[in-house]
Amino acid sequence: MTVITLTILLFALGIGTSLTFVSSHWLLAWMGLEISTLAILPLMAQHHHPRAVEAATKYFLIQATAAAVLLFASTTNAWISGHWDIQQTSHPLPLTMATLALALKIGIAPLHSWQPEVLQGLGLNTGIIMATWQKLAPFAILTQIQTPNSLLLITLGIASIFIGGWGGLNQTQLRKVLGYSSIAHLGWMVLVLQYSRPLALLALLLYIIVTYATFTLFNLQSVTSVKSLFALGAKNPILTTLLPFLLLSLASLPPLTGFLAKLLILKELTKQGLAPTAALAILGTLLSAFFYVRLSVATALTLAPNTMTSTAPWRLSSLRLTLPLSISTALAVALLPLTPALLALFTY
């Protein structure tokens, strides 16, 4: 893919997401979602590998289905109420259809099964966009609509937390692990969305930071499977030291950044009188924490199953840009002390 083509596609990706951000009209928001979908498809299939083409085809079919349901929901709302304003949508039928369509677009359980399979067929560079940027536009619409049934969002959230944790337990491919990780984290955001939108956006921002740092580190070392983590220490000891911190931050262990969002969400759920729901969410997170700890052990405490009798080869300096990794890793590990400032920024 040439530089000009890549620039045009990335520009279209940004335009589509930005159009959805600024839209209060259902048709404009739908148009932004479709521009983003069509812009990422060539990026997904650029390597002409059968798995990449399969992933692009699956993604297109799923997104087209969700877009059709979303358009039908908006049209139904216009037929019932006579207007196209997203925030003025009040009838339960189009609201429920729109919520489920957006859940399918993002990959929230039980409409999640496409996401790990699609991520597995992509390269790590495109996987970063799929796991982070493509979540922004549908989530922006979710924050604008008033879901009439709070039980629906709670059910979607709890199901995503448990399915995301359960599905990642026995995986050997890192992209599938990160796919199920995305499902579990989205469950936490959906759980608190109806009670505190700023808190849900903060959780999304922290998830994007930590996931971007993890994907970038895997991409820098061309690591795609769990067994390749065993030999990572011999290639780059510094990155091997950083990776467990990123994984444990995804597992939301204190005092890392990932713990911040979970702590604030649990506080909000308890304040709303949903202590049993908060307890269920914690139990589901234990499943995710298990496979993150397993990856951390494979990275930091396990040696490759071979004996190196020769001296270590000379390590040439990498030609890849490492500044984004440095910044995102620092943010993914050390943002917890800034909790009061973040609360003031996102709450008021």
Image (tube, rainbow, N blue to C red):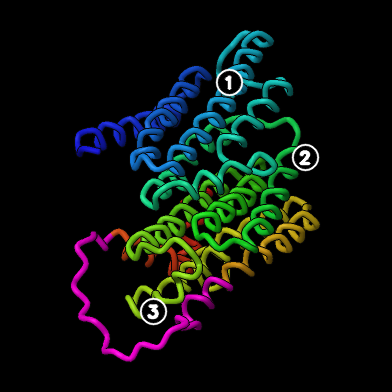
Residue under label 3, please give it: 233
Categorize mark 1 by other alpha carbons within 10 Å: few (<14), some (14-19), many (20+): some
Camera-side mark, 1 or 3: 3
Residue 151 - label: 2
- Work out whether mark 2 precedes mark 1 in sequence or the reverse, and give the earlier one: 1
Residue 68 - label: 1
Question: Magenta segment: does it hold 83?
Answer: no
Res. 45 in view: yes
The amino acid on which the numbered mark 1 sits, given as a three-letter code, is Ala
Q: Is residue 161 above or below residue 8?
A: below
Categorize mark 2 by other alpha carbons within 10 Å: few (<14), some (14-19), many (20+): few
Q: Quadrant of residue 236?
A: bottom left
Foreground of the two, 280 or 299: 299
The amino acid on which the numbered mark 3 sits, given as a three-letter code, is Gly
Q: Position of residue 338 (x, y in %)?
A: 45, 65
Report, in whole angstroms, how far the alpha carbon at label 1 lies from the one at label 3: 48 Å
Q: Is residue 252 above or below residue 47?
A: below
- Whether pointer 2 and pointer 3 mark residues with C-beta atoms closer than 8 Å, the reply is no
Q: What residue is rendered at 45% in x and 72% in y?
A: 229
- Whether pointer 2 and pointer 1 mark residues with C-beta atoms closer than 8 Å, the reply is no
SS of the residue under disc 1? helix
